[in-house]
Image (tube, grey):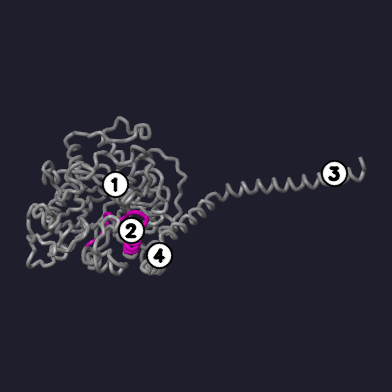
Amino acid sequence: MNKKLVIIIIIQAFVVTFLLGILFGMSIQKKRDNKADGNNKQSENAINDEDESDSSDNVDTDENESSDSSDDSEKDSTKDSDSDDKKGSSSGSDVYVERDVDYGAMDVPEPTTDDWLYTDGSKILDKDGNEVWLTGINWFGYNTGTNTFDGLWASDLNQSIQEIANHGFNVIRVPMSAQLINQWSHGEYPDANFNQATNDYLVGMDSLQIFDYVIGQCRANGLKLIIDIHSAETNASGHMVNLWYTDSVSVEDYYSALSWMADRYKNDDTIIAYDLKNEPHGKPYEGDGAAKWDNSKDANNWKYVAEQAAARVFEKNPNVLVLVEGIEIYPMDIKKNGDFSSTDEKDYYFNWWGGNLRGVKDNPVDLGKYQNKLVYSPHDYGPTVYAQPWFEGDYDFDSLMEDCWHDNWFYIKEENIAPLLIGEWGGFMTEPNITWMTYMRQLIKENHLNHTFWCFNANSGDTGGMVLDDFTTWDEEKYEFVKEVLWNDGEKFIGLDHEIPLGINGISLGEYYK
């Protein structure tokens, strides 16, 4: 071989080897950087996800553009108020949500009694007088015949509870039937419907034991519970019944269910409140079969019944909050129709079931010495649930306030009468719902209204859920939307337990106010 050719080949081999060495070193360094910066990379992905969600929230209407601009100014004003008001929080989208979790049963702490809440005007306070913000979610099933949370036929209970806490919801509103509670009180335990392979640790437990297990796991994750008497009878359509009693569940049965629950869990502040009855309602033509609100002691007077029900709760546990929802109709002229005797719809103001609290102005709920335990809890929905008159035309935030929110219930907050907790709001992330939902989020955020979003369940037909059909995969677009109104300090979500942090992405109330 030519000597010069050999030299050229050797030089080329050396160059190739040198370049390969550089590339190999760069590859190792890149792997090290990826491993070291894994959390940063996940954070970037989360930010990208939020950007995509924000763009999908924009609706091609003048009303939404004005809402977006008010949201921006709202963020600035919130930042300014943080220095003056500890309750103020940064945008929920600022909080990074860790999702790399090893699920399993948590060690359950002993129950405590130092997390009870109180009210002062329109605020909800802890034992030390610090203002708190209840920002939660609904999860039904104990009212439907499942006799536990719906979805456990597919999902893991421990994982679901941890995911709710890890995503920053600090309270779960739990719809239940009075019938199921009374069965428990009588030693009857209807079977709970769950996947015994996925939830093998529940096998052998009756439905009440599973509920107690839920309470323990919620406590371990820093979650609080609101018990909601969603229906008298156990039935997926039980909420359609106007009143709090039926032919098979009497008024006394209804009272007894609340009393038994309050007594059983009186030494455990995991349950912080009782929503006395979901969505009392009824139309003028239904007469005595419709819920009304006046100063009588009539069987269908929700205001009077709510006072009696609250008294039963406080007799067993004077520490919990009670939530009182509105009704459906209210007379336009109290002097002429204060007893709801007219059957003409033109004589009434209408609102969502549970959403009409106009009666508070004329006949406020009187809880006597427990008045500082009262929270009013309206429900509000968008046009995909029902095309209410206030959704006609080019409605916006101001028109919703004027046509619906203010006179039906927001005045309670404005006049410092009592706190509000929007017990149900939510829906699909599509039009025509998203415009309304954006305005409702704005209202909640600007006023720090307490709320429980409807709902975690995938099987809510007219709203959809926070999780998809497998009850495990989160709807990230919807979550990013609601995350804006979850209580946080800009870095961590804030729980309602003074000692136990809210999931792996939150802190305790004691840590926040230290």
Residue at the image position 17 percent from the left and 46 percent from the top: 316
Q: Tag 3: residue type?
A: Ile
Q: Is residue 467 above or below residue 346?
A: above
Q: Secondary structure at mark 3?
A: helix
Q: Position of residue 165 (x, y in %)?
A: 37, 48
Residue at mark 1: 270
Q: Tag 1: residue type?
A: Thr
Residue at mark 2: 433
Q: Tag 4: residue type?
A: Asp
Residue at mark 4: 60
Residue at the image position 30 percent from the left and 46 percent from the top: 139
Q: Nearer the viewer, mark 1 or mark 4?
A: 4
Q: Residue farthest to the top?
A: 204
Which residue is more in the foreground, 387 or 76? 387
Q: Tag 2: residue type?
A: Asn
State yes or no: discs 2 and 1 in contact (Cβ < 8 Å). no
Work out which quarter of the rendered image holds the C terminus and state it: bottom left
Q: Characterize the local packing of mark 3: few (<14), some (14-19) or many (20 or more) Cα atoms within 10 angstroms.
A: few
Q: Secondary structure at mark 4?
A: loop
How far apart are the two marked residues, 3 and 4, measured between alpha carbons?
Answer: 67 Å
Q: Position of residue 215 (x, y in %)?
A: 30, 42
Q: Secondary structure at mark 2?
A: helix
